[in-house]
Image (spheres, rainbow, N blue to C red):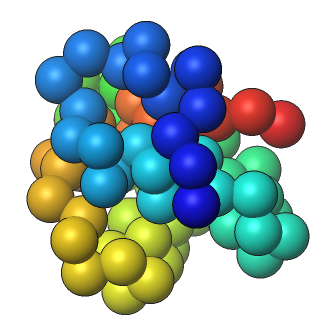
Amino acid sequence: MTLNATGKALKGTSDATTDTVSSSSGNDKKIIEMARGDATSFVASDGAIRGAALEQALGYFRDQDHRMVGTDLEIAEAIVVAPE
């Protein structure tokens, strides 16, 4: 997986978090698309609104890459700006 320009723009997000979320795998893209709305609400509410699709995405990305060290908010931010 490679870190894309969008991921580089995320300040405070670990390289492993952005790298994993920015992955180009087909399954990753489906998870990101399903969670994007929930992630946007989560970021906008500073973590107060947690939707089911975001929870699934958080678990998925942490299971896929055990180097994932970002907070839930950092992962949600990476999902929001991930390429479509």
Q: Is residue 33 above or below residue 13?
A: below
User: Does residue 33 appear left or right of residue 36 in this picture?
Assistant: right
In the rendered view of the protein, which quadrant contains the N terminus? bottom right
Quarter of the rendering occupied by the C terminus: top right
Residue sitting at the far front: 2
- Residue, x 52% and y 40% (percent of image)? 3
Q: How many marks?
A: 0
Q: Residue at image x 57%, y 21%? A: 6
Q: Of all residues shown, which one is farthest toward the bottom?
A: 63
Which image quarter: residue 49?
top left
Q: Of residues 53 and 84, which is closer to you in this image?
A: 84
Query: Residue 15: x and y, percent?
Result: 29, 43
Give x and y (percent) for residue 53: 57, 63
Q: Which residue is located at x 84 percent, y 70 percent?
A: 26
Query: What x and y, as percent, mark residue 10?
Result: 37, 19
Residue 55 visible, this orientation: no
For residue 58, say whether it is visible.
yes
In the visual, does 66 lie left or right of 17? left
Q: In this picture, is 26 found above or below 8? A: below
In the displayed structure image, the side of residue 61 where residue 34 appears, left or right: right
Comparing 39 with 61, the one in front is: 61
Occupied quadrant, residue 13? top left
49 versus 52 height, above or below: above
Q: Nearer the viewer, residue 84 or 23?
A: 23
Q: Position of residue 14 (x, y in %)?
A: 22, 41
Question: Residue visible at 24% across and 65% down?
Answer: 68
| 65 shown above or below 80 | below
